[in-house]
Image (cartoon, rainbow, N blue to C red):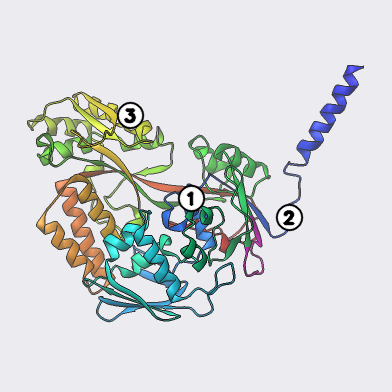
Amino acid sequence: MRLPALLVAAVVALSALAGCSSDEPARPGVVTVGLQEPGTLLPADVDDQAGRFVTGALWTPLADYDPATGKLTPRAAAAITSTDRVTWTVTLRPGLKFHDGTPVTAQSYVDTWQAIAGENWEATPVLTKSLRAKQITAPDATTIRLVLDRPSSQVPAWLSAPGLVPMPASVLASHDWNGFARHPVGDGPFRLADDWAPGTGGTLVRVTPAEGKATEVDLRVGDPVEQYDAVRDGSLDLVTSVAGERHEAMHTDFADRHTTWPLPEAGYLVFPMADPRFADAAVRHAFALAVDRSALEAGPLAHQVDPAHALLPPADAPGERTGTCRPCSFDAAAAKSLLGQSAFTGPTTVYFDPGAGQWTRPLATGVATALGVAVTAAQRPNGRVTGPSTVDLNLASASPADLLSALASASGYSDAGFEQDLTAAESAATTAEAGQLYRVAENQLLRDLPVAPLWTGHGHAVWSPRLHDVTAAAFSGIDLAKLSV
């Protein structure tokens, strides 16, 4: 009599599976979204794609800034203006509110920025090293006034940084940052219904209903491969990342329902300028030409990046680069010849930070093969290193000034002409002029090559036929507020 019992169990199991299948009707206005676990939901400390995606739905930035055109699109701010590029005025839109019902005022921003400046968060350098305002005040509820220590054209880019969004007075008084990250209270188009559940996700509810738009978003943390298959099979509406093993299939499975966009992430090979073995620019160019970026992209980086074609990544670049980036090319013969003309002798080590070993080790092996010298890879020790290092940077703002300065600092590069170019770009009268001068500074770094560009990050998304108007931006990813259902 065991067979009928097994049959009954099988029928029950199949029935349960059917309840989770693609035949289950979608709830009107509800969108299901797959994502990876965010590192944090404290907006000023976010440095990953999933975190930017969720906080981008919970907050509205002061403005959106496009580094390619210099165009500023006001969001929470009605205007960001200056007559001398030293004193800047931010005028907020009236009636802004946090999800707890308290008003968003100019003082909310002033107090939040003071808190950020005092912490070691991802957005802290935007205030302390980039903006460097001598004074930030709130003359009235809708006006923020900033006085800088020098003229700067980059203020709109810095103030548009997603990490500089305001926090309510309750958390600014309690300093319970961990508690706030579990249930963040923003001022954006969606609010978080309950505490974020690590490993599971959370539910976003639209604050102001809009016809044809999602009223609720069910965020589900999970494996990207399984989530991709769930979208393909109809049991999930959208997945915000595509694993490398599904990258090629994406173009046929979702021919007109996939997109990619640049992320504010980039990888570099940083040379120790103080090391006599790398003092010769020919040595640095030889190492740059010995890196097969396409092999890294298709191999250990699993199609999550693009091979670099410039020093400045697309998410941070002031327009298209004119001319080619020779150090971005792979040319093993030229690399070996160039190194042979120098006094360089091996062996050497390429160092990496935790988490970057999976692509730095193949990089070192490829460079060794191309150059014909012994090159190994090792995790970066404490203290000074005696060889090149790989770094992957997450950009906190769309200003090229931040990245160019960071790259020079990372390598110990110092040049009066380069510093003059950065100063001239920052104080330029127009965004077009500033963009040209930042490209001049970029070209100098590519000539002297204290760092070699390797790759730039990009995001992927695929979605079901019931979704429309799927758009994405570098710093926020898929824009849930614009989704049509």
Which one is nearer the viewer's eye here, 42 or 436? 42
Mark 1 lies on residue: 40
Q: Is residue 392 above or below residue 88?
A: above
Q: Residue furthest front?
A: 174
Lateral position of residue 102 relative to residue 385, left or right = right
Q: Looking at the picture, which amino acid does disc 3 mark?
A: Pro
Q: Looking at the picture, which amino acid does disc 2 mark?
A: Arg
Q: Residue furthest top?
A: 1
Specify the segment rendered in magenta.
206-217
Residue 239 in the image: state x and y as whole percent.
57, 47
Q: Which mark is residue 319?
A: none
Q: Looking at the picture, which amino acid does disc 1 mark?
A: Thr
Mark 3 residue crowding within 10 angstroms, few (<14) / some (14–19) / many (20+): some
Q: Which mark is residue 27?
A: 2
Q: Is residue 210 highlighted in magenta? A: yes
Mark 2, secondary structure of its residue = loop
Q: Earlier in the sequence, mark 3 or mark 1?
A: 1
Mark 3, secondary structure of its residue = helix
Residue 410 in view (yes/no): yes
Mark 3 lies on residue: 362
Secondary structure of the magenta portion, mostly? loop
Q: Earlier in the sequence, mark 2 or mark 3?
A: 2
Residue shown at the point (22%, 29%) measured from the top left: 349
Q: Is residue 273 above or below residue 300?
A: below
- Between circles 2 and 1, the one closer to the viewer is 1
